[in-house]
Image (spheres, rainbow, N blue to C red):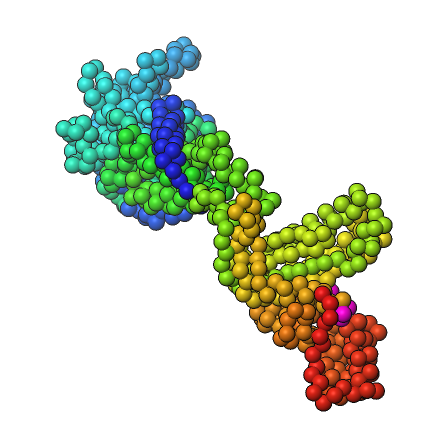
Amino acid sequence: MRRIGGRDIVAATLIALLTGAIFTSPPLQTLQGLSLDILTAMRGRLLGDSRNTATSPVVVVAIDSETYDTPPFKGSPTQTWTREIGRVLGSITEGGAKVIGFDVIFPSSIEQSEIPFGDTAVGGRMKGFDRDYLIALRQISDSGKLVLGEILSNDHPEVPYRAQQVAVRNTVRALNVHTDHDDVIRRMPLSFAIEGRPVPAMAVELAARAAGAKPEIASSGATELSGYAIPSAVPNTMALNFRGLGRDIPTYSFVDLRACVEKGDRDFFRRAFDGKVVLLGTVLNFEDRKLTSMRLAGGYDGTPAARCALPAPASTVQKSRSDIAGVFVHATAVRNLIERDAVTELGFPMRTILTIAFAAIIACAACLLAPSGALLTWSALTLVYAAVAVSAFVHALALPLTEPALASLAALAIMIGYRFMLADRDERFLRKSFAFYLAPEVIETMVTSGKMPALGGEMRNVTMFFSDLSGFSSIAETMTPGALVTLMNEYLSAMTDIIEGHGGYVDKYIGDSIVAMFGAPADDPAHAANAVRAALKCHEKLSELNASNPAFAGHGLSHRIGLNSGEAVVGNIGSRRRFNYTVMSDTVNVASRLEGANKYYGTAIMASETTMTQSGDAFAWRELDAIRVLGRGEAIKVFEPLAERDVESAEQAKVTAAYAEGLACWRAREFAKAADAFGQTAKTDPASALFAKRAQAFTANPPPADWTPVNTLEGK
């Protein structure tokens, strides 16, 4: 995590203000609607809707495809359906409906038809056809339970024909909806100015009649209905709450109700419509379809209600659609008003403040963290915020969702660009300048503190790693300089990748030798095990290079690796003008000696007892000997790591067992038995061959009584 300065704070603030203002500005106001769509989808998919349709205060009577396909309506123009509509409306009213609203408009009557029929027009022969229908409208209207619908328009208004208007004493209300700029219906108008006075929209009129109240304008400017202040972020509109995705509205097929009238089942009408607001409308696949805030979730054309007289159609499985029949938009609005469940949206100032605050948080994260970390932070915080927004939407509060998410993402991108172009130039210069000379952790400390590295060190428990190519000097003499450089670069690169991949730090290269340490600069409690694992991988990698890399062809390179763990001084060591991050102590010297000791035993990797102990039980080992290295009086036991625990081969296990038996006999001065034990594997194991030869010599000429089983190495 980088330090954040005053300039960074100013930049983060300006970026948050800019992105917040942009994404809540009027040109991008469709994002507010998109938030409603996403919240509706997430709430519907994650939480569903547990409301019982039987308790719905609103029901729909659908003039559906079943109606069009069933006699007596099949093949008949809708203008001839009015008598049957009047009969069904009468039964619904007798069943106890509170109020009936028309989402269908009959702009003309069959009595007005001028199509010739014999010596007169069809209309002349049909005089009086609508009389019973108009009488039914008048009776229901006089009881205050009927509202016809109309479409207001300056160009093409659509209104019921004049006789209907007279029958209902002009109780006609607008069915117009509020369409956003993206042609999606998310809000419903509350009223319309007609002849200079506000007239309630259809949904408000129906809810008011059901509640026995009149809509009023409060001092705050909000429309109130029975004490309910209708939330209205967009003036004179109500945000629709599609809590049940349309499935919360019971839907009756008109043709089934007509058959129910013929059947004379008054109890059914009482059970279905008592105390309900009823909306009559068309529910067809290709007529009066509306895109709403359910478009992402998928809406439903109600829930099929109980049947009275006709069997249900064979195909009754409902599928969600991006659009719904228009009558359900009005039904949802009425239910929202009656249940006081309309969506409350934040006003422009609060949406802007919330968006800017979220963008500021992400901008600060982008300033503090690496780009990947900042992106993860943005993802996590956006998910948390989305969960909070969905929880709030369960209670009909719509928090802005897309605006904060997009503004903060833009702030993230801009802040990363700002850091790259301005703030991090010095840091990149330091990293680039010192990358080849200092450990990454040292550079990180230098960048974080803002200070250049200084002389000094500390005691750390580390594992030293020394490696050297066997007989490389003689091989190098036969190679051209170019080929030699290519070979060394390939070798050192491969070994360094493995060492650093296991948490090691390469201190230096000395010709073909590598000096590395594990456990510093970065803390690593498992430094011994990581060093052993790296040594085994390096040995394996060299075999692969010899077999497949053209630069190694014909050379058959082998190397020796020494490992030792213990306390050491690590830090910036050198002169005041030039220094390296390196390590100093006897631990280093012993590791160097163990690397050279491999040549006596014919082994590739040798580790001290300390390293073997600190690496735990992760590996299969064999004890090689107790040795005394040059420049050190104390004897140490040395071990060879064979493989990961339980991965060693059967041959390795056989050699280890025979070697352990021979070593035990050797230390017990049973040299003949030791020679026999070592001899079992002497042909394939150089260390066994060495001990077999020494044991045979001692068998012929036993050592003095004060002999100790310690091998003193004379050279490095």
Residue 364 x %, y %: 39, 39
Q: Which quarter of the figure has residue 292?
A: top left
User: Is residue 467 left or right of 218 when viewed as pictured?
Assistant: right
Residue 451 x %, y %: 45, 44
**Is residue 103 shown in magenta?**
no
- Relative to the observer, which residue lies in front, 455 or 625? 455
Q: Which quarter of the figure has residue 650?
A: bottom right
Tell me what residue is drawn at x 49 percent, y 36 percent: 426
- Relative to the observer, which residue lies in front, 198 or 507? 507
Residue 612 x %, y %: 62, 71
Q: Quadrant of the C terminus?
A: bottom right
- Relative to the observer, which residue lies in front, 352 or 125? 352
Asked if residue 148 shows in the view, the reply is no
> As drawn, which residue projects farthest toward the left?
219
Where 491 sits versus 318, above or below? below
Q: Quadrant of the N terminus?
A: top left
Tell me what residue is drawn at x 25 percent, y 21 percent: 192
User: Is residue 526 left or right of 308 when viewed as pictured?
Assistant: right
User: Is residue 379 left or right of 510 when viewed as pictured?
Assistant: left
Asked if residue 286 shows in the view, the reply is yes
- Relative to the observer, which residue lies in front, 685 or 101? 685
Tell me what residue is drawn at x 75 percent, y 80 percent: 658
Q: Which quarter of the figure has residue 128?
A: top left
Where 206 sits versus 172, above or below? below
> As drawn, which residue projects farthest toward the top?
119
Where 450 sits versus 591, above or below? above
Residue 70 x %, y %: 44, 34
Predominant SS of the magenta segment: loop
**Residue stretch in magenta:** 600-604
Tell me what residue is drawn at x 68 percent, y 66 percent: 593
